[in-house]
Image (cartoon, grey):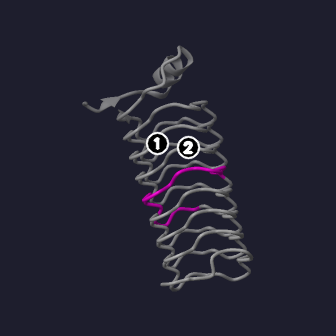
Amino acid sequence: MERYTMNPEELKQRYEAGERDFSIADLRNAALDGIDLSGAVLHGAMLEGATLQRANLSRADLSGATLSGANLTQADLSSADLSDAILDHAILEGTLLEGAILTQADLKAADLGQADLSQADLSEADLTRANLEAADLSGADLATADLHEANLSQASLERANLSRARLDDTNLEGTILEGGDSRLIS
């Protein structure tokens, strides 16, 4: 399958006409603020530098997508599949990621401050230097995740699975760990 370039208006029109599969679309630097793409398939899509503030991407398939430097502030990504996605340096502040699948996702230096990651699967995710200040990670699966040098101050990790997670040089000031897996192996 060959990558194809698409502009935001074309994407919106095709989605509204009932099309849902936009796999490997090239939407680099696209302005998609507030767009509704719930349930869309954007597997392998190129969304580097795109702005998706307040966008509805709930239940969307973004597996393998590239979202480096994208702005997803306050977007709805609940139950979305972001496995193997590249989100390094992305802005996900206040984003709803409840129940999202982020297995093996690259979230290096991403801003997830105040994000809702409750019940999310972040197993094997790379969260090196990520900002998770005041994020809700209650019930999240962080097994074997790399959180070294991450900021988890004031975050909620209640009932979170942290088995084999890497937490060296992680800021855990004020973090709520009650009921979580306390076997923190670096």
| Residues packed near mark 1 inside 10 Å, few (<14), some (14 to 19) or many (20 plus) | many
Nearest the eye: 68 or 186: 186
Q: Judge whether 65 appears above or below 94 on screen.
A: above
> Where residue 53 sits: x, y (%)?
62, 43
Q: CA distance from mark 1 to mark 2?
A: 7 Å
Q: Amino acid at mark 2?
A: Ala
Residue farthest along the top direction in this orientation = 17
Q: Residue drawn 43% across and 60% down? A: 106
Q: Which mark is residue 124?
A: none
Q: On screen, 166 above or below 120? A: below
Label 1 SS: loop
Residue drawn 53% across the image and 37% down it: 60
The secondary structure making up most of the magenta span is loop
Asked if residue 105 lies in the magenta stretch, the reply is: yes
Q: Is residue 63 magenta?
A: no
Left or right, residue 6 beside residue 76: left
Q: Position of residue 25 (x, y in %)?
A: 37, 32
Task: Specify whether 66 is left or right of 145.
Answer: left
The amino acid at mark 1 is Leu
What residue is at 48 percent from the left and 39 percent from the top?
A: 61
Residue 88, quarter of the rendered image: bottom left
x and y percentages locating residue 183 in the rendered image: 58, 82
Q: Helix or strand or loop: what does disc 2 sit on? A: loop
- For this orientation, the residue located farthest to the left is 2
Residue with the mark numbered 2: 80
CB contact under 8 Å: marks 1 and 2: yes
- Picture coordinates of residue 123 (x, y %)? 49, 63
Answer with mark 1 or mark 2, whichever residue precedes in sequence.
1
Identify the residue under disc 1. Answer: 62
Q: Quadrant of the N terminus?
A: top left
Image height check: is 35 above or below 185? Answer: above
Magenta stretch, residue numbers: 95-111
